[in-house]
Amino acid sequence: MQILVNIILLLFIIIIPNTAYAKTIQIDFTDDDTFSKEIVYIDVGDTIEWIPKNEGHNVEFLGGPNMSSLPENSEVDAFHSITFEVSGVYLYHCKPHGNMGMLGLVIVGNDLHNLKEIENINLSSTAKAVMEKLIKSAK
Ligand SMILES: [Cu+2]
């Protein structure tokens, strides 16, 4: 009986930190055509919410650890929420302003294994400069 209690206690100790403390981070669309947080570090299981505080923006993923299964894109002016279950680097932009450098990085689980692929994504020169600035601060 004592063993069973110990096992149950152990399971709680292992499981609780991974579930109960999942964070939610909010990013606004700003009126100067940027995301309020351009680079965000989260853990696996955390959620990002994009808040349409200014009009004319959306969220569209350009890259992630699994290029054939990127997180869902959003409609312009829509609230958007993604829970990140796979660690790695994600790059997204706002479709109307992506070429002007409205983009963001999400780094999940401190995992930079796919950073090279992200750096090789085809972008406008302005967007590329913004991405390189973000990546420099991420390294
Ligand atoms: Cu935009």
Image: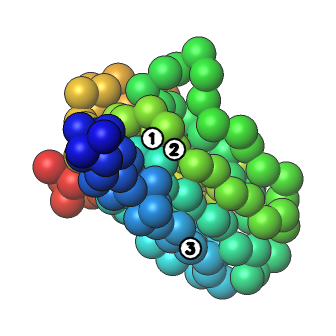
Q: Look at label 3 and name its amino acid.
A: Gln
Image coordinates of residue 104 in percent, x first then y, are 47, 56
Q: Secondary structure at mark 2?
A: loop
Q: Which residue is mark 3?
A: 26
The 10 Å Cα crowd at callout 1, few under 14, some 14 to 19, many 20 or more, is many
Residue 75 seen anywhere in this rendered image of the structure: yes
- Quadrant where the N terminus is found in the figure: top left
| Secondary structure type for disc 1 | strand
- Give residue 93's position: percent from left, percent from top: 59, 50
* Residue 115 in the image: above or below residue 26: above
Q: Please provide percent x and percent y for residue 40.
A: 38, 61
Task: Judge depth for marks 1 and 3 and give the one in front.
Answer: 3
Q: Is mark 2 within 8 Å of ligand 1?
A: no
Which residue is denoted by mark 1 in the rendering? 90
Residue at left offset 70%, top offset 74%:
51
* Crowd tier of the residue under label 2, counting other residues whose Cα lies within 10 Å: few below 14, some 14–19, many 20 or above: many
Left-right relation of 57 to 120 = right
Disc 1 vs disc 2: Cβ atoms closer than 8 Å?
Answer: yes
Please name the residue shown 22% across and 54% down the image.
138
Instruction: Write down the residue under mark 2.
Output: 84
Q: Residue at x 24, y 27 (%)?
A: 113
Tag 1: amino acid: Tyr
Q: Residue at x 56, y 61 (%)?
A: 48
Query: In the shown orientation, is residue 34 left or right of residue 112?
Result: right
Indicate the quadrant where residue 7 lies.
top left
